[in-house]
Amino acid sequence: DKNNYSRLEHNKDSANKLSLALAEVLKNLWEILTQRDYPPTNFKNVISEMNPLFKGIKANDPKDLVLFLLETIHQELNKAPNKNLKTNYVDDTNFESVLYDFHLNYTNTDQSIITEEFNGYSNSMTACGFCGTTIHNVQTFNILFFPLEEIRKFKNYKHNNVTVKDCFEFYQRDNIFPSFYCNRCRRLCQSLNTNRLISNPETLVINLNRGRGLEYNVNIVYDEYINLREFIFSPQSPYYYELTGVICHLGSNDEGGHFIAYCKNSNNCEWYKFNDSFISKCYFYEVQNANLPYVLFYNYVQV
């Protein structure tokens, strides 16, 4: 939004090259909504200069670009007091202690627009099958990765449709591991592992892993709003979201073709289609029926 743009623009520095290039794109997009095209040439050149993976015109997996943008801009704008220190790894049996220590360490090393907007907390719990001791491992995330074909099999669907809520049910499923060494009972035994979302970010990014086989054509079903209250541990966490962006793929397979994006403008609540430099207004039913979504972007809505 414009508040974040102002903060990006305020941090003008030669070391903030990518952040400033993105700020330029956002500023121009707000100003040219009445026009039909905008080529983000400088933004593309800066990305290609900083990461050889994005040189040329080859279609890359959009998650690679999103991860690169989030990580690089965070590094450029990180204002944490001890940003050069690595966050301590925390793994213990007391969840409250783990969460407190991790949060304290993390906020001491990582503070930026990116962490404020895109980062959430998750907890991976591993329970010993013999003595029941549970180990908690708290981590941050800025993208959630969902393998569509595995989710379709997990739900035992005969059809090819998977919903966004199916993805979150899959994420929090129980996993049995046959070989786990427990430090408490000092033996190798079976364990139960479960992932839980502690708190969600303001902007939730979902990557839909399609692979190269049957999973490539699995269809994701989504609405413009989604309530994730049942999947979040913290009652203070954002849970009600509005869909604001979708990256889709056009082509016969995942190794070629072309990516386009649909974005919702927060000022006029209109949807726009971005196809290279061409911009056109569209309706949400077109977004819902778009071909092969790869990445979904949701923004928190207060209720």
Image (spheres, rainbow, N blue to C red):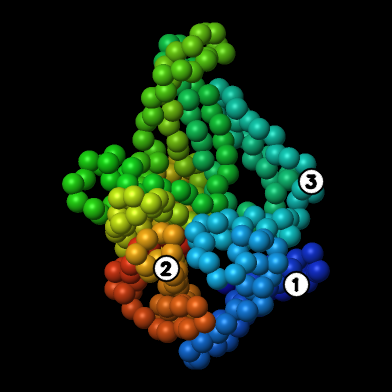
Looking at the image, do the residues carrying marks 3 and 2 touch, with CB atoms under 8 Å apart?
no
Q: Residue at x 46, y 45 (%)?
A: 235
On the image, which quarter does residue 82 sit in? top right
Q: Residue at x 64, y 55 (%)?
A: 71
Tell me the tag on residue 43: none
Q: Dot 3 corresponds to which residue? A: 84
Mark 1 surroundings within 10 Å by alpha-carbon count, few (fewer than 14), some (14 through 19), many (20 or more): few
Q: Amino acid at mark 1?
A: His
Q: Nearer the viewer, residue 45 or 85?
A: 45
CA gap between label 1 and label 3 equals 23 Å
| Residue furthest left in the image | 158
Sequence-wise first label, 1 or 2: 1
Q: Is residue 154 above or below residue 110?
A: above
Q: Is residue 106 above or below residue 60?
A: above
Looking at the image, do the residues carrying marks 1 and 3 touch, with CB atoms under 8 Å apart?
no
Q: Amino acid at mark 3?
A: Asn
Q: Nearer the viewer, residue 209 or 272?
A: 209
Looking at the image, do the residues carrying marks 1 and 2 touch, with CB atoms under 8 Å apart?
no
Mark 2 surroundings within 10 Å by alpha-carbon count, few (fewer than 14), some (14 through 19), many (20 or more): few
Tell me the tag on residue 10: 1
Identify the image quadrant of the C terminus: bottom left
Q: Dot 2 corresponds to which residue? A: 257
Label 2 secondary element: loop
Q: Is residue 261 above or below residue 110?
A: below
CA gap between label 1 and label 2 equals 38 Å
112 left or right of 274 in image: right
Sequence-wise first label, 3 or 2: 3
Residue 30 visible, this orientation: no
101 left or right of 79 in image: left
